[in-house]
């Protein structure tokens, strides 16, 4: 996936405009590539986080009821609560990035509609 994204980042302009000129389609393209790179990184990090959380929850679940005293029991409960909080934070990050990707898709559609409207504009 990273090879594909690196290839996409080589393209600097879709419209072919040069000398610092920009077009909404070019901006939308660059933003789309950035969102794709962000999502790719997010997927990789989330997969690692899922494995860590799963392992921590299994380990915590196996220790329940084995504490020798009240403090140990509270420590076990606290560890499970910490893992739960981390899981919720990671889930929020995934949802936020999904919203960013959906927003970028909307921006891409707006740029395409703008380009179509510009192409159909009558000028003498």
Image (tube, rainbow, N blue to C red):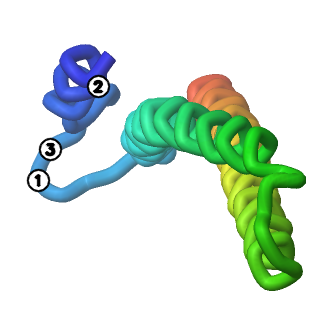
Q: Which residue is mark 1?
A: 19
**Contact, mark 1 vs mark 3 (Cβ under 8 Å):** yes
Seen from the viewer's position, the closer of residues 42 and 55 is 55
Among all residues in the image, which is located at the extreme front?
68
First along the sequence among labels 2 and 1: 2
Measured from the top left, where is residue 96 in percent x and y?
73, 54
Q: Which residue is mark 3?
A: 18
**Contact, mark 3 vs mark 2 (Cβ under 8 Å):** no
Q: Which mark is residue 88?
A: none
Whole-Å distance between the Cαs marked 3 and 2? Answer: 22 Å
Seen from the viewer's position, the closer of residues 42 and 57 is 57
Q: Nearer the viewer, mark 3 or mark 2?
A: 2
Measured from the top left, where is residue 18 in percent x and y?
14, 44
Residue in view at x 64 percent, y 25 percent: 116
| One can see residue 25 in this view | no
Q: Nearer the viewer, mark 2 or mark 1?
A: 2
Whole-Å distance between the Cαs marked 1 and 3? Answer: 4 Å
Mark 1 residue element:
loop
Q: Which residue is mark 2?
A: 5
In the displayed structure, does residue 112 sit left or right of residue 41?
Answer: right
Measured from the top left, where is residue 1 in percent x and y?
32, 16
In the displayed structure, does residue 48 sit left or right of residue 117?
Answer: left
**Contact, mark 2 vs mark 1 (Cβ under 8 Å):** no
Residue in view at x 70 percent, y 30 percent: 109
First along the sequence among labels 3 and 2: 2
């Amino acid at each position: 996936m990273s090879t594909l994204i690196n290839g996409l980042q080589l393209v600097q302009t879709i419209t072919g405009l040069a000398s610092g000129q920009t077009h909404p389609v070019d901006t939308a393209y660059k933003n789309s590539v950035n969102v794709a790179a962000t999502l790719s990184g997010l997927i990789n990090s989330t997969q690692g986080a899922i494995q860590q959380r799963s392992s921590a929850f299994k380990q915590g679940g196996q220790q329940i009821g084995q504490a020798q005293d009240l403090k140990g029991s509270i420590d076990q409960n606290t560890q499970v609560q910490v893992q739960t909080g981390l899981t919720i934070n990671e889930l929020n990050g995934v949802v936020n990035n999904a919203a960013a990707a959906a927003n970028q898709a909307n921006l891409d559609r707006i740029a395409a509609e703008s380009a179509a409207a510009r192409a159909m504009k009558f000028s003498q």
